[in-house]
Image: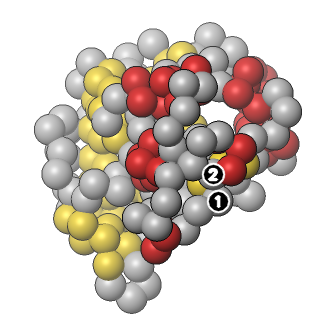
Amino acid sequence: MQYAIVGDIHSSKGDLEDVLSHINERAPEAVLIGTGDLFECTISKRYVNERTYSTLEEVMILPEGFVELLNFPSVKGNQEERILLITETDDPLLKMLSAMPEKIELDAAEVIHGHQWKWGGEPWSLLEADVSKGLTFYGHSHRSGLLRSGREEEAVLFDHPYDVSGGQTLVNVGAVVFDKEWVLYDNIENTVTFMKAK
């Protein structure tokens, strides 16, 4: 089975449309999965304790027709968590955000946003990841990357299948917003292919 894994959309409808079109060209049978941060929260994390809001339009970017494109399961990202923390409304979209899981399992693999892990350093990067599967897909940093058995690939190649069988592998799928990046995971061939829409 093939999975098209997308994340860090941050309410960018145009970029998402381009990526979905590319997925439809390259892997039309693939099952879509999201790594979170589908939406962009407009309230800085510095101000989350100042007040609560009664409408989603006050706290997030919501382009017309954007929600209708999100017809695939996704884990919850830090943007969704912040929106949930500061908003009190019976809007069905808030219920959808609340129902998003922290992890999704894909047989021998798992999907998580990654903000739950330890980040830092200069340049800012992943320092420590808590994983339960041999293959983990994540986002959060907006940088495509492949970490196999503790060693990071210098720079990932796009449209090049990487063998991910054996050893601990972390795959950062990159960002839809601005970069139009996504990952094709084939769990029969045990390959991951980084993709970039134009």
Horizontal and vertical percent position of residue 45: 47, 67
Left or right: residue 91 versus residue 99 is right
Q: Is residue 39 left or right of residue 104?
A: right
Numbered tag placed on residue 127 in the rendering: none
| Residue 165 position in % (x across, y down) | 27, 35
In the image shown, does 183 or 102 lie closer to the viewer? 102
Looking at marks 2 and 1 on the same chain, the residue that comes earlier in the sequence is marked by 1
Task: Please tell me in which quadrant of the rendered image residue 111 appears.
Answer: top left
Name the amino acid type tagged 1. Answer: Thr
Task: From the image, tell me which residue sits under label 2.
Answer: 59
Quarter of the rendering containing residue 145: bottom left
Mark 2 and mark 1: span between their CA atoms?
5 Å
Outermost residue toward the bottom in this view? 122
For label 1, the residue is 42
Q: Is residue 127 above or below residue 2?
A: below
Dot 2 and dot 1 residues touching (CB under 8 Å): yes
